[in-house]
Structures are given as C-alpha cells and as structure tokens.
Image: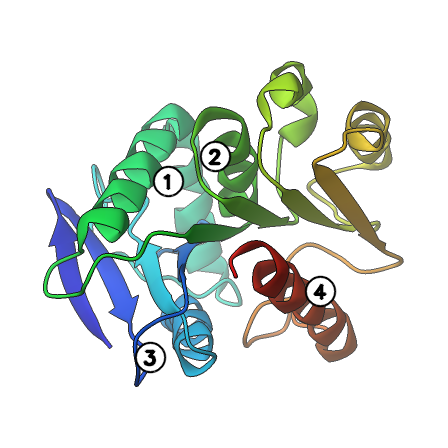
C-alpha cells in the first residue's frame, strides 16, 4: 500500500501478494482519499486485484481527507463538489486506466481494468462507462445520472448500478428516470436497495448499513469476477 502520482494527481495503490488477476480503479466520494476508500482498496488487493484510488479533487484541494459524520467536514465536501468538473474526472480516469495498462509506477502492466465509484464517484462510474474503454464499471448511489441518460447508447461494456431507494440525494423521480432509461439496456444491471439511504456501503461511520453493504459488495465482487477474468 503506497501513494504514487499520475502526472500531478496523487493515487493510492494497494497491490496483492502475487501477480494481480486484474485491476480495479476506485473513485471516491466527495470526501477524498480517506481511510474508508483506502480500506476498500486494501480489500480488493486482498482478493487478488491491483487497486488504485484517485484523488479526484487534486486540482484545487489535493490530499484532502474528510469525515462525513462531522458536519463541518461534510459542508467542506459539498463545497468541493460545487467546484468540481466531472469532465475533468473522466480525463483523470482515462489517464489512470492508461497508466495501469502500461505499468503504473513500479507495478507491472495490468491489461483488464474495472472501476467502482461511490456518490460522485458513482456518477463518474456511469460517465466512464459511456466515455472510456474501461472493461466494466460499478456505481454506488451515483448522483445526477438521470441528467446524463442521453449518453447511455455509448455504454459498450458492462455497467452495474446500486440504487438505494431512500437516497436523499437521488429522489424517486430521478430513480424512476434511471430505471426507464437503463432497464432495457443489454449492458446495464440495476439493483435497488429498499429503504436504504445514500452511503449505505461506506466502510465505516454512521451511514453504513452492514446487511445492505454486504449484499451490494457481494454482487460487485461477482460482477468483477465475471467480467475481469
């Protein structure tokens, strides 16, 4: 486990004990490369993947780590979200995919790359599926996907979205639009989580719902096993 750079962007890398079976790019929530995101990377490394998490706010708040259970830090994160341009995020994702496939730092090249993102990272997972050649992508409680459904025709590789039905950032109308726009798409799988709220699969903190997280994470693990093998 170590920090390295892709250009000027910090990335956290967790490597398995043996040669990785594939790579997983982890795109954080609006709270930066915090302990929860690093734990997710460490978990993927323990399962045999090279896991790489990007510092999405590196252009204006490099190295920020925030705790969503602390109100002041939550508000700070919302401020960064307002500043953030998700199109830049896609460029960062593309650069990271390229780096992984060509050999990131001292690590050997890894050909197959999956992506998993949370919150804002969940939106970026959808955008990566429509705009990059990532081999597969998973989004948890992605925000504003309903505003980008016109891009769905460009999804060429498998995409899975985890949708908590009580998400206070993604309301019923937005969820209905996502289902209407994507249910019939041959490359897309949607899972609803009845009564769960935004952040239910966080590694730690007040938002976590253990049963929901275990269900969603099990589905994600099986999805990557299927599409990155």
User: Residue 228: where, in percent of width, then height?
Assistant: 51, 57
Q: Is residue 109 visible?
A: yes
Q: Do the residues bearing badges 3 and 4 touch, measured as CB atoms within 8 Å?
A: no
Mark nearer the N terminus (2 vs 1): 1
| Residue most extreme to the top | 150
Residue at which label 3 appears: 16
Identify which residue is drawn at 53% across, 67% down: 69
Q: Secondary structure at mark 1?
A: helix
Residue at which label 4 appears: 219
Q: CA distance from mark 3 to mark 1?
A: 32 Å
Task: Give the label, 3 or 2, closer to the camera.
Answer: 3
Q: Is residue 139 above or below residue 60?
A: below
Q: CA distance from mark 3 to mark 2?
A: 25 Å
Q: Secondary structure at mark 3?
A: loop
User: Residue 91: where, in percent of width, then height?
Assistant: 30, 30
Residue at which label 2 appears: 128
Crowding at mark 1 (Cα within 10 Å: few <14, some 14-19, many 20+)? some
Q: Do the residues bearing badges 4 and 1 touch, measured as CB atoms within 8 Å?
A: no
Q: CA distance from mark 4 to mark 1?
A: 30 Å
Crowding at mark 2 (Cα within 10 Å: few <14, some 14-19, many 20+)? many
Q: Nearer the viewer, residue 206 or 29?
A: 29
Q: Is residue 214 left or right of residue 57?
A: right
Crowding at mark 4 (Cα within 10 Å: few <14, some 14-19, many 20+)? some
Q: CA distance from mark 2 to mark 4?
A: 20 Å
Q: CA distance from mark 3 to mark 4?
A: 21 Å
Q: Is residue 212 above or below residue 122?
A: below
């Amino acid at each position: 486990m170590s920090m390295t750079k892709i250009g000027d962007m910090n990335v956290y890398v967790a490597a398995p004990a043996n040669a990785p079976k594939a790579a997983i790019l982890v795109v954080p929530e609006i709270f930066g490369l915090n302990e929860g995101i690093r734990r997710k990377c460490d978990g993927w490394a323990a399962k045999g993947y090279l896991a790489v998490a990007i510092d999405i706010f590196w252009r204006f708040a490099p190295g920020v780590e925030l705790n969503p259970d602390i109100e002041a830090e939550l508000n700070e994160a919302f401020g960064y979200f307002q500043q953030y341009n998700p199109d830049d995020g896609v460029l960062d994702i593309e650069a990271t995919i390229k780096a992984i496939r060509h050999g990131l730092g001292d690590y050997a090249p890894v050909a197959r790359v999956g992506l998993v993102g949370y919150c804002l990272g969940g939106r970026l997972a959808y955008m990566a599926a429509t705009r990059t050649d990532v081999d597969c992508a998973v989004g948890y409680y992605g925000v504003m996907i309903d505003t980008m459904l016109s891009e769905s025709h460009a999804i060429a590789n498998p995409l899975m979205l985890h949708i908590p039905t009580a998400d206070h950032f993604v309301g019923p109308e937005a969820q209905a639009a996502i289902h209407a726009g994507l249910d019939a798409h041959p490359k897309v799988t949607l899972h609803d989580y009845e009564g769960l709220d935004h952040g239910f699969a966080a590694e730690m903190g007040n938002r976590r719902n253990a049963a929901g997280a275990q269900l969603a994470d099990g589905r994600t693990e099986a999805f990557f096993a299927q599409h990155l093998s």
